[in-house]
């Protein structure tokens, strides 16, 4: 196709036309979404491109508000001495005074559909099938353009999906797509574009390019998201503080706050990666609060609720007399905790510190982030990643956690990349003095560890 495919998004008022466009364009700022009817009062457009080439133009239109009266008017226009077909009646209507006055909103809709290659007729599948919708479809069919019904909000418990499919088939509209602009199915856009290709064969190459690009973008976003989470985990696993015996509590709290802040950086980066704003997660139940995690990383009850393994290992060492109680602190103090861990039988935990690190800091107390906190970071950042990947850009309700339970993060061994990070404090951005000493070789090792960990995620 030499020109982009032009699609008019049409339908009754307040059925989710703008919501559909937000999801298709991945733009949370497109138009205005509201429960109030008639929110869109004029035509707005958006363009989808691949490698700089525009392949599709989408036009949001006002809602049809008085289809019954308009249909009666069109029937009078077509019943004169010279009988007019559908497009002829639409053309006569658009040239009339009624199109500029009584039916001004409806005129914007049919004018845009007449100027487009096809229309997406959006239906709120939660609504009962009323006569006014049949009248709307009859009016839109008069424009002489292919029309693809899109059943929106099909994931709602009160959706009448089957009833609508039967009703549309009775009107001769057998090609139809079930979609949900709030929680779009994984293959929702692909099925929508494939259905359009059946209606507009000449547009098939452009639509196939759009589908291939959507799949590639999805894979790239997931990979980039896993890399962001892996980078966070490496930063926290490699975090170290030399703590003087007489100044432990301020140092412990300072490192805790740095870990909280570092997690927030990851949250913001993930929201931006998937095209969401910080406030899109503000009232969510992930749990997030004002863009931050509501449950504190170092709250032992949070770890217990998530089922993260706390018994044995360093927890047993803490009970044997380590400097900081793991169950309450989420932190480990160097050689004192190390001795307690060995007494508790967790030799593998002691090895995780690395011989070079212990040798370098022998006699000092070294503050670090405990494994359960790393597990919690991995669990909820991975949950956020999945939730964002499945969220439509028209969603306004609280962000929900997906149903997932990665047991290897809850109780299995931590990935080898995190074990290696324990022995490389220069890898962590939370250790600015040591980070400045990171050479090219160490940076390459860190990059490799992040990539390996991203694959494990």
Image (cartoon, helix red, strand yellow):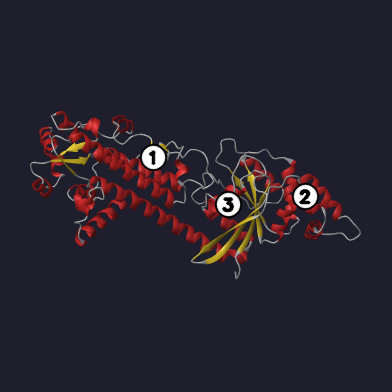
Q: Residues within 10 Å of mark 3 (few under 14, many from 20)?
A: many
* Residue 140 place in picture, x, y as percent: 73, 53
The answer to whether residue 145 is seen in the rendering is yes
Is residue 99 positioned above or below 37 on the image? Answer: below
Residue 20 lies left or right of residue 426; in this view the side is: right
Front residue of 247 and 299: 247
Of badges 1 and 3, the one in the foreground is 1
Which residue in the rendered view is the most extreme toward the right? 81
The answer to whether residue 408 is seen in the rendering is no
SS at badge 1: strand
SS at badge 2: loop
Per the image, the residue denoted by label 1 is 292
First in residue order: circle 2 vs circle 3:
3
Per the image, the residue denoted by label 2 is 103
- CA distance separating discs 2 and 3: 24 Å
Residue 275 lies left or right of residue 328; in this view the side is: right
């Amino acid at each position: 196709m030499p020109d982009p495919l032009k699609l008019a998004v049409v339908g009754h008022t307040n059925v989710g036309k703008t919501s559909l466009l937000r999801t298709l364009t991945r733009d949370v700022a497109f138009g205005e979404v509201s429960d109030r009817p008639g929110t869109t009062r004029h035509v707005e457009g958006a363009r989808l491109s691949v490698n700089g080439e525009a392949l599709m133009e989408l036009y949001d239109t006002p809602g049809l508000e008085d289809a019954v009266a308009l249909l009666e008017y069109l029937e009078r226009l077509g019943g004169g001495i010279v009988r007019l077909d559908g497009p002829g009646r639409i053309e006569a209507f658009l040239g009339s005074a009624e199109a500029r006055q009584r039916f001004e909103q409806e005129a914007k809709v049919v004018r845009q559909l007449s100027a487009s290659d096809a229309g997406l007729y959006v239906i709120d599948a939660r609504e009962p099938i009323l006569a006014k919708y049949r009248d709307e479809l009859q009016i839109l069919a008069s424009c002489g353009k292919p029309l693809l019904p899109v059943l929106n909000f099909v994931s709602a418990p009160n959706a009448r999906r089957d009833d609508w499919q039967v009703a549309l088939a009775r009107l001769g509209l057998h090609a139809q797509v079930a979609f949900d602009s709030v929680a779009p199915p994984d293959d929702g856009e692909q099925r929508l574009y494939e259905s359009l290709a059946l209606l507009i064969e000449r547009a098939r190459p452009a639509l196939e390019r759009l589908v291939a690009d959507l799949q590639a973008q999805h894979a790239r976003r997931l990979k980039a998201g896993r890399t962001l989470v892996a980078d966070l985990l490496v930063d926290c696993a490699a975090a170290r503080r030399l703590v003087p015996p007489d100044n432990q509590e301020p140092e412990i709290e300072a490192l805790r706050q740095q870990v909280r802040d570092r997690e927030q950086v990851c949250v913001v980066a993930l929201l931006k990666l998937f095209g969401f704003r910080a406030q899109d997660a503000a009232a969510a139940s992930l749990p997030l609060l004002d863009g931050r995690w509501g449950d504190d990383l170092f709250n032992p009850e949070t770890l217990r609720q998530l089922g993260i393994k706390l018994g044995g290992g360093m927890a047993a060492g803490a009970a044997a007399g380590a400097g900081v109680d793991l169950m309450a602190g989420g932190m480990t103090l160097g050689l004192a905790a190390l001795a307690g861990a060995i007494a508790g039988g967790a030799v593998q935990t002691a090895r995780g510190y690395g011989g070079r690190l212990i040798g370098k800091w022998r006699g000092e107390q070294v503050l670090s982030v405990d494994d359960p906190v790393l597990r919690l970071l991995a669990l909820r950042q991975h949950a956020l990643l999945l939730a964002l990947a499945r969220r439509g850009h028209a969603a306004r309700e609280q962000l929900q956690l997906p149903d997932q339970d990665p047991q290897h993060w809850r109780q299995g061994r931590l990935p080898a990349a995190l074990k290696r990070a324990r022995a490389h404090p220069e890898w962590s951005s939370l250790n600015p003095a040591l980070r400045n000493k990171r050479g090219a070789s160490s940076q390459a090792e860190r990059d490799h560890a992040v990539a390996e960990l991203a694959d494990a995620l």
